[in-house]
Amino acid sequence: MRRGMLLILAAFCCSLAAPALAASEARHPHPQAWSFAKPLGTFDQASVQRGYQVYEEVCSACHSLSALSYRNLGDKGGPFAAYRAKNHETGAEEVRIGPSAHGGKFISPNDNPAVKAIAAKFDVSEIDGTTGDIVQRPARPADRFASPFVNEAAARAANGGAYPPDLSVITRARHGGADYIYALLTGYGEAPPPGVEEVPGKHYNPYFRGGWVAMAPQLTPDRVSFTDGSPSTPDQMARDVASFLEWAGDPKAELRKKMGVAVLGYLLALTLLLFFAYRQIWRGEKH
């Protein structure tokens, strides 16, 4: 009898805890069609360029990219890779940026005019060799991405106690990767489920664990004016910045895939060569 009462009490307690557990779970993001998701997939570099623009104009006010240097933007496979090629109409040599620039001579990221211009928009700290004082100077391609705050305490003070996460490997650190980033950025506006208590100063988003996130909706229509004329809708901005952050989490992904194909081709050719050598050496021998 006593055991039965304990089981009933335990079941009752679990039923009370169930809504709280359900409320803390995040909704699973819907899979999106990404060009890079396939085993040999490549990045849509125009989308990655737009995604960097969204990061620069929106996300960089709070979020850092500490694992990246500006020069990574101009590496081979990067969104702002530069090539020196000859114009077939005029015969003049010109610098071309981006995915349509293949076929020319690759320009080192440290000499890349686009990367230099991007880095120069930000200031970084360094110690003056003469006075020993900390001074500010425009960033160079070799510098790490500038952090929006000097330390974690300053970041929390500016964001109501919340600490904006570093976005360098966010698509690797969050289940769902780019799907999660896209879903989170476009998931605002839904009312919380009945019985879920509102958290002051936070915003409901079903794709965030716990449901309440300190970050307000950021991607409002026309917030970013894309340089290539693409529509500045929340969906487009979210898709582009998710592509950029996927690239940022593994800047060498395309080069690694190409290298993998070359290695597999080499191993296949070597296997065939060894097979025919075996047949030639041991022909006529009984096994």
Image: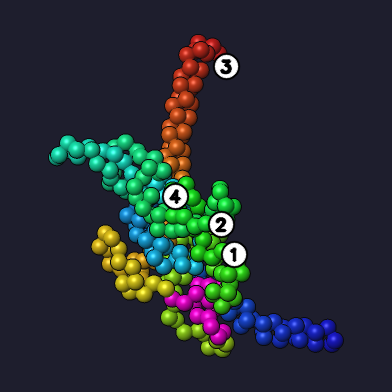
SS at mark 2?
strand
Cα gap from disc 2 to disc 4, whole angstroms: 17 Å
Secondary structure at numbered mark 4: loop
Q: Which residue is mark 3?
A: 287
| Dot 1 amino acid type | Asn
Q: Position of residue 90 (x, y in %)?
A: 15, 39
Amino acid type, mark 2: Ile
The amino acid sitting under disc 3 is His
Residue picked out by circle 2:
134
Q: Write down the residue under mark 1.
A: 151
Q: Which of the two discs, 3 and 2, labels the residue nearer the N terminus?
A: 2
User: Neighbour class for label 3 at 10 Å: few (<14), some, many (≥20)?
Assistant: few
Of the image marks 1 and 4, the number of the one nearer the N terminus: 4
Q: Earlier in the sequence, mark 1 or mark 2?
A: 2
Asked if residue 64 is among those painted magenta in the image, a careful observer would answer no
Say which of marks 3 and 1 sits in front: 1
Q: Residues within 10 Å of mark 1 (few under 14, many from 20)?
A: few
